[in-house]
Image: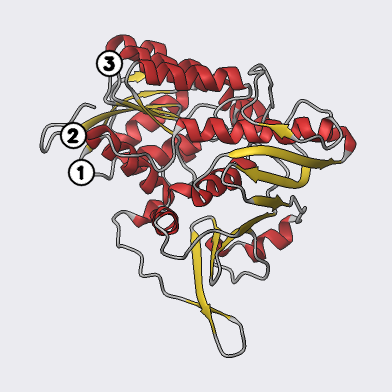
Amino acid sequence: MCTQLANAKHKVAIIGCGRLGQHYATAYSTYPDTEIVAIAEFNKERRIAVGQRFGVKNLYQDAESLLKEIVPDIGVVVTPTKWMKESVIACAEAGVKGVSTDKPIAASLSDADAMVDSCKSNGVVFAGGNLPRAHNHVQEAAKWLREGKYGEIQGAIVSSIGNCISGQGVQWISALRLFMNSEVGEVMCWGQPESNVYSEDDEMLSNGIFSMNNGVNVPFYGTSIDDSVKTKIRKHDGVKATHKMGLDVWTEDSLIRWFWDSVEIYKGFDKNGKRILTDPEFSPWKWQEFGYMTSSIRSLIKSIETGSELAVSGHDLRQALEVAIAMKLSAQKGNVPIKLPLVDRTHTLIPEIYRWIGGDQTGNIQSVEEASTDLNM
């Protein structure tokens, strides 16, 4: 691994400057050890507006044009999923030290494999982007669990995995793999409605069982919850939870409950046999205003500098996609158990259209005024 010289700034290129790309740019422009040196954005008006907003003069239409003139230390790929592969591989082959992308990583396993393999063969750190599993508290709780602080894992359950099994499901699958410290070895899934089960996209209401390689069977549920209820149950929206979504993992006397950036840890029981909620005293960390995006970015920078393990990697995103594809295959075959890894890497699952081709192509176009300010964040 390459180590950055003391006090030197990591040079960063943002590739794809839609709303999420601008959020990355805001974070990278805040840290004292990073500097945005170039931007690639297909939409010309947005490219100019975002360049002016962040004081970046090196502006390009795409990754290929950018990399011909500038090889940054870090390539931040935030394009729609359809175009992630070409940008990630272009960065890896150009000689960046680290590259990050976001979810879902691809539609096909072969494309995800190509990205992971290209980064590995070129010695490039491949990070997975803006996932709640990267959050410092989530990482710390999972570390305590791996170290045996709460005893041996006896069971787990995933609730409300979402209707889009690669776009939303990646969050739950990635957190499950982290907390269980294990891969999913087999999937059995029931899906509905039938029209979605046999479609090529990732929309499907799913229920089933993940059989982990550590021997624990984890039931999962895809309960559909309308938008009015969702606003009441999401703790990170600042509203008191009325329903427990997310992932529960338990040992003999402890329960670790995860939902997005919230981790609750219960240990022991009171005189009535009720679990006792503890104060885990998580370690302090900087730049909390960017939430788990900061955790993901700082993990990438640390990995480039020291070779440390990533909080979320491109490999993690690939594994989540593979599990989602296995869910679809199991449902299509009549709830047949599907073993992982999948031998056929051509299997494909198209994500939601706005994730696949972006807002400009689906009518959710960001105005130049919005791109010129941080009011949309």
Q: Cβ–Cβ below 8 Å for labels 2 and 1?
A: yes
As drawn, the residue found furthest toward the bottom would be 271
Point out which mark residue 9 bears.
Answer: 2
Rounded to the nearest whole Å, what is the CA distance between mark 3 and mark 2?
15 Å
In this picture, residue 214 sits left or right of residue 196: left
Name the N-terminal-most of marks 2 and 1.
2
Residue 3 found in image quarter: top left
Q: Position of residue 337 (x, y in %)?
A: 76, 36
Q: In the rendered image, which residue does mark 3 sit on?
A: 70
Name the N-terminal-most of marks 1 and 3.
1
Mark 1: amino acid: Pro
Q: In the rendered image, which residue does mark 1 sit on?
A: 32
Q: Position of residue 300 (x, y in %)?
A: 33, 37
Q: Is residue 91 visible?
A: no
Rounded to the nearest whole Å, what is the CA distance between mark 2 and mark 1?
8 Å
Mark 3: amino acid: Ile
Q: Is residue 279 above or below residue 142?
A: below
Q: Quadrant of the N terminus?
A: top left
Q: Position of residue 11 (x, y in %)?
A: 24, 28
In this picture, residue 371 sits left or right of residue 93: right
Point out which mark residue 332 bears.
Answer: none
**SS type, badge 1:** loop
- Crowd tier of the residue under label 1, counting other residues whose Cα lies within 10 Å: few below 14, some 14–19, many 20 or above: few
Q: Cβ–Cβ below 8 Å for labels 1 and 3?
A: no
Q: Image point 76% across, 56% down: which residue?
A: 226
